[in-house]
Amino acid sequence: MTTQVESTKLTADTVLSVRNLTVDLPKGMERAFAVRDISFDLPRGEILCVIGESGSGKSVTANAMMGLLPPLIRVSSGEILFQGQDLLKLDEPALRKLRGRVVSMIFQDPLSALNPLMTVGEQVVEVMAAHDEGTPKSRQARALELLTEVGLPDPALMLHQYPFRLSGGQRQRVMIAMALALEPDILIADEPTTALDVTTQAQILDLIQQIQRKKGMTVLFITHDFGVVAEIADRVIVMEKGLIVEQGVADTVFGAPQHPYTERLIAAVPKLRQDDRAARSKDNDPQDAPVLTVEKLNLIYRSGGGWFKKLREVKAVQDASFTLHRGRTLGVVGESGSGKTSLGRLLIKLLESESGQIIYQGKDIAPMKESDFRPLRPKIQMIFQDPFASLNPRSTIGHIITVGPIAQGMKKADARTKALRILEKVGLDAGAYARYPHEFSGGQRQRVGIARALMFDPDVLVADEAVSALDVSIQAQILQLLDEIQRETQVAMFFITHDLRVASQICDELLVMQNGRIVEHGPPSQIFHAPKDAYTKELVAAIPGSDHALQKV
Amino acid sequence: MTAADIQTTPQRWWHSRGFRRFAQHRLAMVGMAMLFLLTLACIVGPYLLPYDELYIDLRARFSPPMTDDHYLGTDPLGRDIAARLLMAGRISLLVGFFAMVLSTAIGTVIGVVAGYYGGKVNSVLMRFVDAFLAFPSIFLLLALAAFINPSPVMITIIIAVTGWMEVARIVEAEVKSLRERDFVLAGRMLGLRNTHIMFRELLPNMVGPIIVAATLTVARAILLEAYISFLGYGIQPPLPSWGNMLNGAQQYLATAPWLAIIPGITITIAVTSFNFIGDGLRDALDVRTDPA
C-alpha cells in the first residue's frame, strides 16, 4: 500500500493527505471498522474518484474529512493533514471555520439536503453569512452570480424560488452553488448524480468538471458507477470492505487493473453491446408467437378537480402500441416522468387505461373488471424496483412467495414444495423460506421478488427498474439470472429501465419514451448506433463513459 | 436439504429488539409488576379473605383498617372493604379490558377501511369519526346509561362505543402511508382480494401502534367506568366496582377517609400501570428506531 502512495506523489502537489485512517464501527455491525488503515493524497486541481460498492466505506471517508461522522462512529487512529495541521485534532469551532471555506460538500439527495422552508437565494446567502463573508448586499449579488455560474435558468427569479419548485437537476445545481459560495479549495461530492436521470447526470458531471477546471479546484468524487468515473476522473481509488485495494491514474486503472476486485467491478459495468442479443429460440420461431399486443393505449392522470380546484390533466401514456413475443425482451428507456412505469403498470392492470386495447389470449384485458381479470393475473407478473418496499417486512419469505398461489387455490403443501424449488432456482438456499426480508441484502431481496413472480409460471414478466437500486456487481448477477430464466421458461419480458447500458444487455428490442410518447422503436444496435429521433440521440450521448476506453474493453 | 428439514418459525418474538427494549424500560416493568400483583390479588384474593363482599356485619360498621380480620376496614354497612375492593377489581378490570378489545376492533376496522380505500369512503368514515370526537363522551355515556339497564356488559359496550375514534385515526394514518408501498401493489399483482391485503398484509405492520393505543384505552376505560359508577349511572350496588365504592364514600370523607382513599389509590395504581406499559410499548415498538 505505502509504495502506491509514494508513487502517486510524483505528479501534482498535495492539498490534503489522509494517513493510516481507521474508523471504528459500533459493536454488532457486520465488521469492526468502517475503513481500516487507508492512506491517500488529494492532488491539487484534480478530480479524484473514490469508487466502491455500498458499505465499502467511501462515504465514511468523506464524512471523516468534513468532521461530520455520526457520534457512534469514531476515528480510532490516523491523521488527515491539511496545510500541516491534523483536521482530526481540531475542535468543533475550528472545524466549522474550515468547512465551506476550505472543504465543501454536495450530497446525494439534493431535496433532503436543502431546507424546504427557505428560498434558494436565502440558503446560498446563509452560507456566506454564517462565515461573516461580505455585507448583506454583496452576499445577495454574489448569490446571483453563483446561480448564474451553475447554469440555472433565469437566476434572478430563481433566487426567490423554494426548493420544491425545482427539478432534481436544478436542486443539485443549487447545492453546488452553495458549496462554491466561499470558493473552497476542496469539493467533496458524495454520489451527487446517483439520484438523477442520465441526461441530467451528464449535465451535472459536465458542470462539475467545468467549474473544477476554471477554478483549479480539487474534487473528491464518490460514486459506485464506473461509467461516471470514466467520464471525469483524473485519479481513482477503489475501495472494498473498508480497505483501499487499488489506486492510481484513471487510465491505468481502467487499462490494466491490478487488483481482482477492480477487474470484477470493471467487468460488471454494463456495456453497450455492439450487436443485438442472439435470438434465443429459433426452434420456437419467436416471431410467430406474440404473447401480448398493445394498441393505442392511453393513460391520463387527473388531479385536483375538487369543489374549488381546477381539474388538471397529465397525459402519462399516449397511443402506445407494441407487441411482446414469447422468450423475448422488450425494453423501455426514458427519463423519469416519461411514462415508462405507468405503461408497465397498465400492462398488469395496476392502473386503469383511458382508452386502447391490451390483447392477451385473444381477449382485450384493458376494459376488464378486477373480478374478471383476477383469474388471469397469475400469468402477468411484475418485479418491482425497490427491493425494500416491495416485500412485506412482517411476512416470512415463504409467506411472501406462497400467498399468491394459495389465494389462487393452490394447496399449501404444493405451494411450499414449488416455492423451495424456485428459491433454489433464483439462487437462494431453502433456509430463506422461514426468514424475514430484513435479514437479506438488496440483491437477495430482489431474488425473492423474482421468485414471487415466477411462482405462477407467468407468460409475461414486467420488470420495473428491477436492477436500478442495486450495486453494479449485483446488477450483473440479477441480469444474468433474468436471462437464464428467460431461456428456460420462454417468458416474455417487458423491461423498464433508465439505464441504457443495462437495456442494451438484456433487450431484444427497445422503445424510447419521452413525455408519455413512444418516440423510437427498434433493435438496440440501431437505437444505440444509429438513433433517428433527436431525443434518442441526446439519451445515447448522455451515457456515462460512452466515449471512453471502458466501452472498448 | 428436503422440505421437512426446514425450520419454519425462526425468530422468536422474545429475541426481538422491540422486546429487549421493552424489558429495559424501567417504568414499563414497574407497571407490569403492579398490574400483575393487582390482577393476581383480584383473582385469588377473594378466596383467601375471611369475609365475602356482600356479608353485612352491622356491629363492625366504619371499622378503620386493620381492625380484627377487616384488613382494610369496613364500609357504612359493615361490609369488608378488602373483599369488596378485590371483587370490584374483577369487574372494573374486566370492563376495562373488554371495552379495550371492542373499541380497538371497531377503530381498527374503520381505520383500515378508510385508509385503504381513500377518497369518498375515507371522507365519509373520517367525518363520522370527527362527529363522534366532537361529542363530549362523558355526556354521551351518561345519556346512554340513563336509557339502558346498566349491567357490566352494557357498560362495557357503551364505553367501547365512545372510545374507538383514537384508534381509528391512528390506524387510518398508518394505512395511508403503508398502502403506497410496493408490497401492496405486489399483493394486487398476485390477485389477492382487498380484504386479504387489508387485514392479512397491512394489519400485521400496524401491530405496534395499535397495541400502544389499546393499552392507553384500557386505562381510559377503567377511568370512565369509575366516573359513571361514581355518578350512580354505572355498575349498580350491591355489585361492587371501584367507582361506586367511591360514590358511597363521599359523605363520610371527614369521618372515615379510608372509604375513599383505598379505592382511589387502587384506581390510580391500575391506570398509571397501564399508562406506563403503554409508554414502554410506544418506545419499544417505534419502528423508526429500528434499522430494518
Image (cartoon, rainbow, N blue to C red):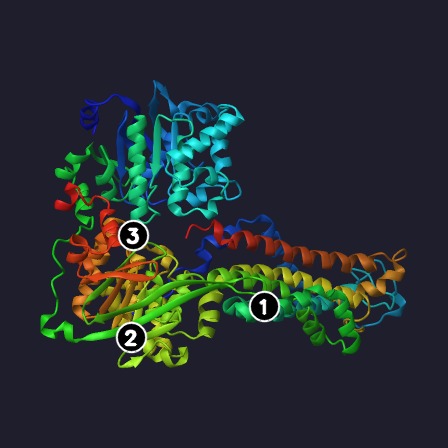
Q: Which residue is mark 3?
A: A470
Residue closest to the eye, A66 or B28: A66
Residue B96 vertical position relative to residue A82 in the rendered view, above or below: below
Q: Which residue is mark 1?
A: B123
Label 1: how many residues lie within 10 Å, few (<14), some (14-19) or many (20+)? Answer: few
Mark 2 belongs to chain = A
C-alpha distance separating marks 2 and 1: 36 Å
Horizontal side of A51 relative to A60 (left or right) equals left
Q: Residue at point 61% right, 50% down?
A: B27
Label 2: how many residues lie within 10 Å, few (<14), some (14-19) or many (20+)? Answer: many
Residue closest to the eye, A107 or A528: A528
Residue A187 vertical position relative to residue A519 in the rendered view, above or below: above
- Measured as percent of width and height from the top left, residue B277 is found at 60, 56
Numbered disc 1: secondary structure: helix
Q: Quadrant of the N terminus of chain B?
A: bottom left
- Measured as percent of width and height from the top left, residue A81 is found at 33, 22
Res. B160 image quadrant: bottom right
Horizontal side of B78 relative to B15 (left or right) equals right
Residue B108 vertical position relative to residue B67 in the rendered view, above or below: below
